[in-house]
Image (cartoon, rainbow, N blue to C red):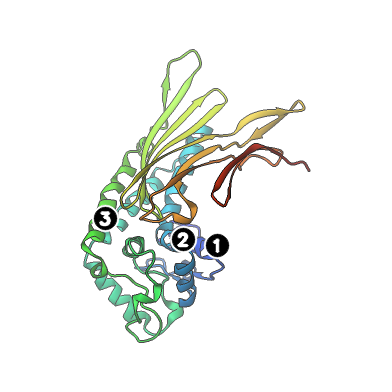
Amino acid sequence: MALPLADAWLHEEWHRAVLNHRGISSFNDVYHLNLFAEMIAVSHVDDQDLVRLKQKYPAEQIRLNEAGIEGEQQLVLKLEKDNFFGRKNAWHYFLYWLIKLNSLFYVASGNSTETDELTDEFNQKEGRNIEARDFTGHDFTAWVYDLHRPKEAYQERGIHPSGKGLDRYIKFSDLTSDERTFLHRQAQLQWLNLLDPHLIGLEGWHIPTSTPLRLNLSMGHMLTSFGYTVDTHLFLQRNLINLFIVGHRFFNHQRRFSGLEIQLIDYPSKLEQKSLLSHLRTRSLDTTQRTELLHQSSRARWIIRANDLPAIVRPMVRLLRRKDQIHWLGGWQCQFG
């Protein structure tokens, strides 16, 4: 149901967040309160802004298309972590199922000629009104199209059937055989998101040790700007230690990369005999180079971050690149006041 603050609203707001990051204005059509709309648009987007985004930031333009379900998946993960580590036992199961099944069927729907029929219908309905058009049409036909064409100018999409503006929407018939196969694979991998004990109310298992240990384990699949990632989520709780560990396996067109993310959550620490709740999240992510987060990337680097600490003391690791030399700079960054 398309209501503000509901699932559809969140989906569109994550699309808009990517646009807003580059100063591109837009409107979430959820606010029209058409509760049972067949399609919710992110409207009032200028063609030239999309041209500029694709030209200057191709990785962000690709992520723009998949950001909607990325946001929904992050919501589910956040609620699961809050339930597990906070022992809240809040009843979110319906929302978990709604988001995961909706994402699965939405990705799968891109591999169908029905997508072309809907695209023609929306093009005819919107006509020459550029402001009414969605920024992309079907999220995942556009995602896989741009994923395989990061250097293709946005203008190559051609002119809108009405003769006014650019033809933003990508049809199933616009995809090559390889692109259709790749998109079909993503729909199959979406089933991994159902390998999650939280879906049936299993919030964790107790392991008999000298110190009580709770754990839970789930799988995940997420689309990215360079391809996709298959993740294993491990929830661990022992006394005051809350650990969330993610093993990443990143895939692009030809290569695979591994990554590890570790979060120490809500660990109480002391500073001058005063107890503090340090929401410490230390991450070590293996990704492609920031400027090369694309489907054909062949290099990777480790990024070590701990930037979610309170502004008191933070570990700091920086990678400095000067001409052909690379230097690591490490230490502690202190801030007071």
Discs 2, 1 touching: Cβ within 8 Å = yes
In this rendering, does residue 33 appear at all? Answer: no
Callout in the foreground (2, 1) = 2
- C-alpha distance separating marks 3 and 2: 20 Å
Measure how far apart labels 3 and 1 are at the Cα level: 28 Å
Image mark for residue 60: 2
Query: How dense is the environment of label 2, judged by Cα within 10 Å: few (below 14), some, or many (20 and up)?
Result: many
Q: Is residue 100 above or below residue 86?
A: below
Q: Quadrant of the C terminus?
A: top right
The quarter of the picture where residue 160 lies is bottom left
Say which residue appears at 63% left-offset and 37% top-offset.
330
Q: Residues within 10 Å of mark 3 (few under 14, many from 20)?
A: some
Q: Residue pushed farthest front?
A: 324
At a point 52% along the width and 39% down the height, the residue shown is 283
Residue 135, x across and y down, in percent: 42, 70
Instruction: Classify 165 as above or below 317.
Output: below
Residue density around tag 1, few if under 14, some if 14–19, many if 20 or more, within 10 Å: few
The secondary structure type at the circle numbered 2 is: helix
Earlier residue among tags 3 and 1 = 1
Taking the image as shown, residue 74 lies to the left or right of residue 314, namely left
Amino acid found under the numbered disc labelled 1: His
Q: Position of residue 8 (x, y in %)?
A: 43, 60
Label 1 sits on residue: 21
